[in-house]
Amino acid sequence: MGAQTGATLLLASLLLALAAITSSNTEGDILYAQRQAWNDPNGVLQSWDPTLANPCYWFHVSCNNENSVVRVDLGNAGISGPLIPELGQLKSLRYLELYENKMSGRIPATLGNLRRLISLDLYSNHLTGAIPGSLGNIASLCFLRIHRNKLAGGIPASLGRLTKLLRLELQENMLTGTVPLEVLSLVLVGDLTKLDVVENNLSGTVRSCKQRGRVHFICILVLYS
């Protein structure tokens, strides 16, 4: 009986190890596909070698104890090109730091599948299109900073579901409409300490605002009364 139990535990351990290897290889395939979609003039992605066992050995990539990718750090790396939809399959990702590059195209709606994400920093790029409403599905999100792009359309009301959000920075885009009440309510019912939407084409806001107490508020006019 003891030998059978030991064999069962060994088999379970082998299956878990195999699952971890398979997961890391899949994530490596995704990140390598993203590398192929980017222009990397400074060669910061040279270590992203698909022949290595998993992406945990690559520069600018961090993994957890299960060899799952939890962080991608490529801020101010001189990279240009689009974000591929497959990034939404990095299920353990917690930090996606791609700020101050030359990223173009749309923010993939599939990023809303990153249910463990804490920080999404895509600011100071050349991203276009609308803000995906699917980002409102990331209940763990604390930092959403996508300012200084060329994003257009309205602010999704679904972002009002992000009650753990500490900073929401949408300034210096081409957003239109009004700030949804669902988003404004995060000041009262959530943890929001910075809400910045200045230098857009929104109704009911001013073009600049000073720090006011706990919240960097956007100075909503009586359009919401």
Image (cartoon, rainbow, N blue to C red):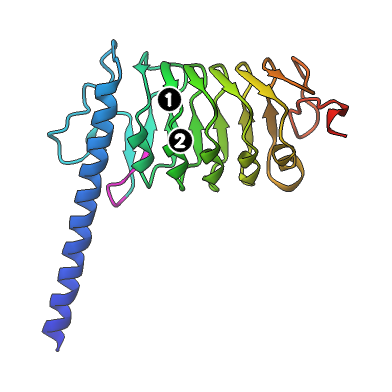
Badges 1 and 2: C-beta atoms under 8 Å apart?
no
From the viewer's side, name the closer residue of 135 and 53. 135
Q: Residues within 10 Å of mark 2 (few under 14, many from 20)?
A: some
Q: Is residue 223 left or right of residue 131?
A: right
Residue tagged 1: 98
**Residue at (76% x, 28% y) in the render:** 217
Which residues fall within the magenta stretch?
65-70
- Secondary structure at badge 2 equals helix
From the viewer's side, name the closer residue of 3 and 147. 147
In the image, is residue 148 above or below residue 117?
above
Residue 88 point in image, percent of width and height: 38, 39
Residue 164 point in image, percent of width and height: 61, 46
Q: Residues within 10 Å of mark 1 (few under 14, many from 20)?
A: many
Q: Amino acid at mark 2?
A: Ala
Instruction: Please tell me whether residue 67 belongs to the stretch shown in magenta.
Output: yes
- Secondary structure at badge 1 equals loop
**Residue at (68% x, 31% y) in the render:** 194
**Residue at (79% x, 23% y) in the render:** 204
| Magenta stretch secondary structure, dominant | loop
Q: Amino acid at mark 1?
A: Leu
For residue 4, what is the image quadrant?
Answer: bottom left
Residue tagged 2: 109
In the image, is residue 177 above or below residue 162?
above
Asked whether residue 55 appears in the rendered view, the answer is no
Total numbered badges shown on the rendered structure:
2
Of the 4 image quadrants, the one containing the N terminus is bottom left
Q: Is residue 134 left or right of residue 181?
A: left
Counting residues from the N terminus, which is met first, the one under dot 1 or under dot 2?
1
